[in-house]
Image (cartoon, helix red, strand yellow):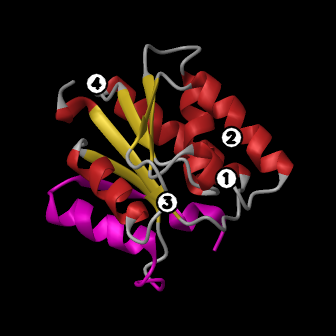
Amino acid sequence: MEKASCCCFTGHRILKVTDELKTSLRSVLVGLIESNALEFFAGGALGWDMLCEETVIELKKQYEVRLHLVLPCPVGELTTKWVYARKDRFDRILCSADSVTILSDNYYDGCMRERNAYLVEHCSQCVCCFNEKHSRSGTAQTVRMAKKNGLNIINLFYQQGY
């Protein structure tokens, strides 16, 4: 798989999902697809990741795109504190993914960072929902990695209506 045709996602878990944000995300993804980005990598987190994963799944009905989930640890450990509705939503995403890569046999301090590094290392584009005021977040860390690695970064944070 050619890195130039790959896009990853990173964003905050707490997210104000507006119609404007959904429309902007879909529009950006269609533009990337039409520019030959056909492989999408996501980390399986709540919030932004799930919104992006579901959008790619929806776009699979129209385009030949693939969704690759890159999980920091086994699903049971990743979702252990999630309420049933979120687990059920994630199960539907898992079933629709084209591949699932689990990076570690168990959760450990730093496994999320390893997941984020994997996403950045395998892609040339990053679509994020990043509030620059949260410079100590995992999203900030991933955006810094993406910048350092020369990824094209598209930030849709202000499409939430802020």
Which sits earlier in the primary sequence, circle 2 or circle 1? 1
Q: Nearer the viewer, mark 2 or mark 3?
A: 3
Q: Which residue occupies 66% across, 64% down?
A: 15
Amino acid at dot 3:
Tyr
For the residues labelled 1 and 4, the Cα–Cα distance comes to 33 Å
Foreground of the two, 126 or 74: 74
What number is the disc on residue 107?
A: 3
Which sits earlier in the primary sequence, circle 3 or circle 4? 4
Residue 30 in sight in this render: yes
Residue 126 point in image, percent of width and height: 34, 51
On the image, numbered disc 2 is attached to which residue?
A: 90
Task: Name above or below for residue 106 compared with residue 113.
Answer: above
Residue 118 point in image, percent of width and height: 29, 50
Which sits earlier in the primary sequence, circle 1 or circle 4? 4
Tell me the quarter of the picture where residue 116 sits.
Answer: bottom left
Q: Which residue occupies 18% across, 34% down?
A: 4
For the residues labelled 3 and 4, the Cα–Cα distance comes to 35 Å
Q: Nearer the viewer, mark 4 or mark 2?
A: 2
Mark 1 neighbour class, 10 Å CA radius: few under 14, some 14 to 19, many 20 or more: some
Amino acid at dot 1:
Thr
Which sits earlier in the primary sequence, circle 2 or circle 3? 2
Amino acid at dot 4:
Asn
Could you tell me which secondary element the residue under label 2 belongs to?
helix
Q: Which residues are magenta?
A: 133-162
Which sits earlier in the primary sequence, circle 3 or circle 1? 1
Q: Are marks 3 and 4 in contact (CB under 8 Å)?
A: no
Q: Are marks 2 and 1 in contact (CB under 8 Å)?
A: yes
On the image, numbered disc 1 is attached to which residue?
A: 79
For the residues labelled 2 and 1, the Cα–Cα distance comes to 9 Å
On the image, numbered disc 4 is attached to which residue?
A: 36
